[in-house]
Image (cartoon, rainbow, N blue to C red):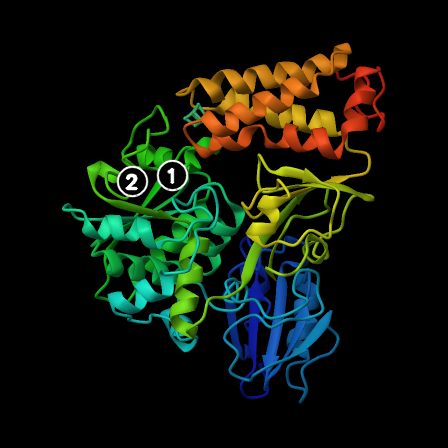
Amino acid sequence: MTRITATDGTTIRISSAGPSRALRNRATDVDAAVVEVGSTGLPAIEPLVAVTRAGETAFHARCSPMEMDAIAASLDEEAVSTAGDAVAQHDPDATRLPAVDLPGLRGSDRVILGACGWRRPTEPEDHEAAGGFTDPDATAVLEAAADLRGRGWGDLCHDEPLAATWKTARDADDDPVVVVNAHGNTTDTLLLSSAPFEVLDGAVAAARAVGAESVVVYTSVDDDRAVETVREAAANYPSPAPAVDVVTGPAEYRAAEPTMALEAIEGNHRLEARIRPPGPESTGLHGRPTLVHTPRTLAHLAVSLRTGRQPDTRTVTLTGDVADPATVEVSESETLETALDAVDIDGEFKAACVGGRFGGLTRDADVALDPATLTEAGLGTEGTVHVLAEDRCVLEFVGKRTQFAADENCGRCVPCREGTTQLADLLRDIYDGEYAPGDIEELARVMDTSSICAFGVQAGRPARTALTEFESELRAHADGRCPTSSCLDAVEVT
Ligand code: SF4
């Protein structure tokens, strides 16, 4: 076959969460850089092939092998092919995925997720070109972290500034350790798979700030690709840097809780939350002072150190009644409505459970995504949104979430262990005509204020928010009627 000589400087990027070797093999007769990059976090448009030349990129979504042949055949033409799904103009030396008119990529350029779908995850050269591998001193890191708040329930400083926790770890007598908690959150797994150097930069900086000489990356045992990629990235990380271990824990929801993560890393089979104080920052992994941060927190830290300012963005993963899930990055001032642009909802939007497994329910797509607004609205800040379409029964949805909490809690404290079971019973009673909103509200309040860890604190939130947002729908069930007609026969809320 005749080799196709592409115009100088052409790069073809293939982005996919799975293997992309088949597409790459279709471009072996092309004299151009063909690189496999990590997933964008947007399976609806992957495999995504991006052809870049002189500050212009043509994107081909859901690219098939036959389309790849056509792309390859067009590479000797002067201009970038416009036969793709969208074209973006950008800086010729762009080091992050540019904004483009595709679902999930509209708006401004991604910052925290900028490497995802653009840079080779384990190639130091790509990360260095983006200004990575910064070598800040401890003072610079402490300044960058002063106002940074932890992201996600797996972070020891969830929605809290890092500074006080870091000071405790730094002042402790024993050698500190940094744990990267990537368990159970889609964005965190995406960062490890597609932008591991961003996470490692943050972890190395945090280690330097507190004087730690070891970093442990912790993931679910299911996240094979993340484990493999971060291991390779750690091996390629320039020295000197702290030693990096990668450890997996069971694929159970509660295993993401920071102290249960430490139990899993230590190899304990029975996962129970640790009572605080003392917190992990003074007595953590194997008794050593320990920071536990999510990849999202650490990637924010890394970008702040590089750019001198904190990105005011949030990452959100949308799931539920949608054609494909999507992970997006939006400005904190944007609303849920903006994030929803990334997904095709299976029908009309009814509500969203905002803030993870035990998020809060809202019908209001105009709610802003900054943590203060979300908290004030009774919603969660975990960065995961479950979309409910019009035909989804809220009582069934809330009942399942509550039953999950009853089945999956660690059993260590009474408010959560007994409270989740009683709450599931109260919701089940509605089917028998006994609707007791006051009892539900009070029980959720007690769980919130008395549970040992965030699991129990949050477990009553779906039910509590359903009381206010969907009062008439709950009451209708007590009258023997499901307004969505989807659970009339569902006597058991399991
Ligand atoms: S709140 Fe729930 S998960 Fe947390 S310690 Fe108590 S029983 Fe365990």
Q: Is residue 200 above or below residue 222?
A: below
Nearer the camera: disc 2 or disc 1:
2
For ligand 1, which image quadrant applies?
top left
Residue ID for mark 2: 280
The structure residue drawn at horizontal position 30% and vertical position 28%, both measured from the top left corner, is 268
Disc 1, SS: helix
Mark 2 → mark 1, Cα distance in angstroms: 8 Å
Q: Position of residue 411 (x, y in %)?
A: 43, 19
How crowded pointer 1 is (Cα within 10 Å; few <14, some 14-19, many 20+) is rated as many
The structure residue drawn at horizontal position 80% and vertical position 21%, both measured from the top left corner, is 475
Q: Does any portion of residue 329 appear in the rendered image?
A: yes
Sequence-wise, which precedes: disc 2 or disc 1?
A: 1
Q: Position of residue 244 (x, y in %)?
A: 27, 53
* Quarter of the figure with the N terminus: bottom right
Disc 2, SS: loop
Q: Is residue 79 left or right of residue 389?
A: left
Q: Is residue 284 above or below residue 331?
A: above
Question: In the image, what residue type sits under mark 1?
Answer: Pro
